[in-house]
Image (cartoon, rainbow, N blue to C red):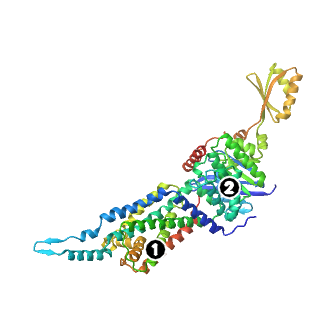
Amino acid sequence: MSESVIIVNNLTKVYPGGVLAVDHISFEVKEGEIFALLGPNGAGKSTTIGMLTTALRPTEGEAYVGGFSVTREPAKVRSIIGVVPQEFSADEDLTAWENITLIGYLYGLPRDEVKRRAEELLQMVGLYGVKDKKVETFSGGMRRRLEIAMGLINRPRVLFLDEPTLGLDVQTRAAIWEYVLKLKKDYNMTIFLTTHYLEEADSYGDRVAIIDRGRILVIGRPDELKKSVTWDTVEIEVTGPEDTIRKALSGIRQIKEFTFVDGRLVVKVSDGPLAIPQIVNSLSSMGLEVRELSMSRPTLDEVYMHYTGRSMREEFISKEEAFAMRRTLRRARS
Amino acid sequence: MSKIKTPHLHGLWALTNRELKKWYKEPVILILSLIQPILWIGIFGKAMNLANMFQGASISIPGLTIPRQIIDQIGNLVLKETFGTTDYFSFLAVGMLSFIVLFTSMSSGMTIVWDRRLGFLGKLLTTPVPRGSIIISKVLASIIKSLAQATIVLLIGVLLGLRFSFSIAMPAAFLLMYLTLFLLSFGFSSLFLMLALRSTRWETQMAIMNLLNMPLLFSSNSFYPISYMPWWLKPIALANPLTYANAITRWALIGVTPGVSIMVAFAYLVAFAMLFAALGITLSWRFLSL
């Protein structure tokens, strides 16, 4: 659990024309971990995956996957990774079965083994029944499941998922995540994923790295990140003179600040679950009645805002990228 | 746990097979690509029947009646002198074999552009299949397609009246024809794949194809012999691999005396194929990426 399966050192990519897509990033990913790279479109997520999966050559810096250098031993890296690209990559003119077995042969697996694994994987993602149908007839969710199955044919140590749920509806997204978590459990894989869905990084990532304009701003467990920069918000409906309320709250350590909004008391606290009983007790002891109380915890968007000064936003993206994304979305929704 | 055996060959055949599947599962495209050479043979070849111009007529000049046989004889001599055969239709039909090979091989570059645009190439590049195999598989598929299409064009030529006059034993003649077309396709497929290695726009690739196909065709001996070309076109025709392919196939199949020795023509095609295949594979190692 403690060994680093991905080591990234000052990795940099400058595209021809001088666009700095990834700017000296460094991080490590531990064996068996789900590592989420979170950032808006154009932040450098796909470029980072491209370099780690040896499809793109770094301009500077080095990265090791499973102990192999992505620049000096790309063939070895390729043999131990599985990649589910952001764009659908299956050949539309071929069937699901033809697609997945083709990828199996590209890994040099023997024919019987390819067939055995293809059958197992297609069954796992629920596509075995339609294995002889052309991929062009598949819905977005089916395509994504096929892509995941294709990414697993070589039993990779590390699975790279580039925006695995882009453009999919909520139910399909949940289903995809079910598969991913099951995979992680069954095969003890390390999963490296990129996403611009905050909730996904939050709920599924063991650790999250926030990337913006090619730089990694912060890395940590989602709860740690949230705790480090933000406060829980407690909203209380309570009646009574403001002065009394002020007095009641004055002694509680966890309280950062409080305001009155539309007759409700809004309190920012460092540790909600610990602070709430104290707040309620203190208010009651002053003879004030707490009628309603709610607490909200911060989201990663607040963490993101803290580090970048702005909310996650749509960035200007290149024409090629826009083309690819539109196509992916179109196919995902068909 | 799993044994990895001969990954190179495995990947190579699997990829070639994919290209071929896409081709024979889409018969419409296959048929469409055959239409042009068939039109050339069927319409141009039949209408532009030069033999009719020189044969079957008798000319009466006042005071002088030239018998038909003499006119025919003179006509045949002129035709023979010009085309190496009195049968222009067969001359053109055999020339169409290299035409279809050229056009089929040219379109191989498009498959890389599409694979890139549709995301397949991106996936491919993350698998351990060697970069060279990606290109070689496309070249192989293109050669197989070219030879299959050439066979169909040959059969249609025969149906429309192509008459063989083998210079060597028939099996050897056909073998030589396939070998020649194989080399031609090998070279042209590699060349056009090479041009598409970094291309992201199929429009560019189409433009390159349209820019080169007719000039390549008309600067060869596909329609007319080199000896009738203006002086400035001759060197171009002599550099054009189509010229040598046509010289060999016409010699083998319909007995046309080649302008160059068959050995030289064959050696030229081998060199052409080897040069561009080597270049294509070397460049793909270096430049094939997203």
Frontmost residue, B214 versus A52: B214
Can you give x and y, in whole percent of width and height, for residue B10 in the image? 63, 66
Which chain is indicated by disc 2?
A
Q: How many marks?
A: 2
Left or right: B240 as drawn, with respect to B69: right
Which chain is indicated by disc 1?
B
- The residue at which mark 2 appears reads as A151
Question: Farthest residue toward the right?
Answer: A285
User: What mark, if any, has residue A58 been given in the picture?
Assistant: none
Mark 2 is on which residue type? Answer: Gly
Locate the N terminus of chain B and report the quarter of the image it occupies. Answer: bottom right
Examine the rendering and report whether any part of residue B126 can be seen: no
Quarter of the figure with residue A254:
top right
In the image, residue B112 above or below residue A235: below
- SS class of the residue under badge 1? helix
Examine the rendering and report whether any part of residue A231 can be seen: yes
Binning the other alpha carbons within 10 Å of mark 1 as few (below 14), some (14 to 19) or many (20 upward) gives many
Mark 1 is on which residue type? Answer: Thr
Is the residue at mark 2 from the same chain as the one at mark 1?
no
Comparing marks 2 and 1, which lies closer to the viewer? Answer: 1
Can you give x and y, in whole percent of width and height, for residue B128 in the image? 66, 63
Residue pictured at 76% horizontal, 55% vertical = A187
Left or right: B148 as drawn, with respect to A55: left
Quarter of the figure with residue A278:
top right
- The residue at which mark 1 appears reads as B180
In the image, residue A211 above or below residue B31: above
Can you give x and y, in whole percent of width and height, for residue B173 in the image? 44, 77
Q: CA distance from mark 2 to mark 1?
A: 42 Å
- SS class of the residue under badge 2? helix
